[in-house]
Amino acid sequence: MNVVGSRPDGWWRDRRAAMTRLVDDLEAYAAATGERVNVMFDGRAFPIERSLVEVGFAGSSRPNAADDAIVEHLETGRLGPAPTVVTSDAALAERVRAHGAEVIGAGAFRRRLEAAADAPPRD
């Protein structure tokens, strides 16, 4: 949600639509870069499947549920070697760095998404 919140476009009026738009943007990013992309949202799952992006839901409304799920994925190696985690949350950044992840801020990643939207898909 850090990436969603990095653009004040009224996303808070319809969180599901904002999440779906983010996944659409991530799908374009994955197609343009060839990078593996996972996204983890707080709360209950709803249909939002894409072919290039793995979408996960923390399934809990407790605070930081998605953060905990991301750290769990790092602990189990599910995100592969040396993943990059996108967050503007200092506490999560510290937690994921302790597991060997790189960190990029939401605003910087939003700029990457926008650049990828203008790039042709990889073959």
Image: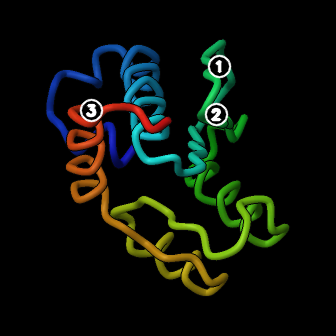
Query: Which residue is drawn at the image coordinates 59% and 58% (left, top)?
Result: 67
Which label sits on residue 49?
1
Quadrant occupied by the N terminus: top left
Task: Place residue 99 in its image quadrant.
Answer: bottom right
Task: Place residue 47 in its image quadrant.
Answer: top right
Residue 93 image point, x, y percent: 46, 74
Q: Nearer the viewer, residue 55 or 2?
A: 55
Comparing marks 3 and 1, which lies closer to the viewer? Answer: 3
Q: Nearer the viewer, residue 17 or 82?
A: 82
Which residue corresponds to mark 3?
117
| Marks 3 and 2, the one that precedes in the sequence | 2
Which label sits on residue 55?
2
Query: Which residue is drawn at the image coordinates 80% and 68% (left, top)?
Result: 77
Element marked by disc 1? loop
Comparing marks 3 and 2, which lies closer to the viewer? Answer: 3
Name of the residue lying farthest toward the right = 76
Q: Amino acid at mark 3?
A: Ala
Residue 97 image point, x, y percent: 55, 82
Residues at marks 3 and 1, CA–CA distance in whole angstroms: 19 Å
Q: Amino acid at mark 2?
A: Val
Query: Which residue is drawn at the image coordinates 18% and 37% (left, top)?
Result: 7
Mark 2, other Cα within 10 Å: few <14 / some 14–19 / many ≥20: some
Identify whether 113 is placed above or below 73: above
Q: Amino acid at mark 1?
A: Glu
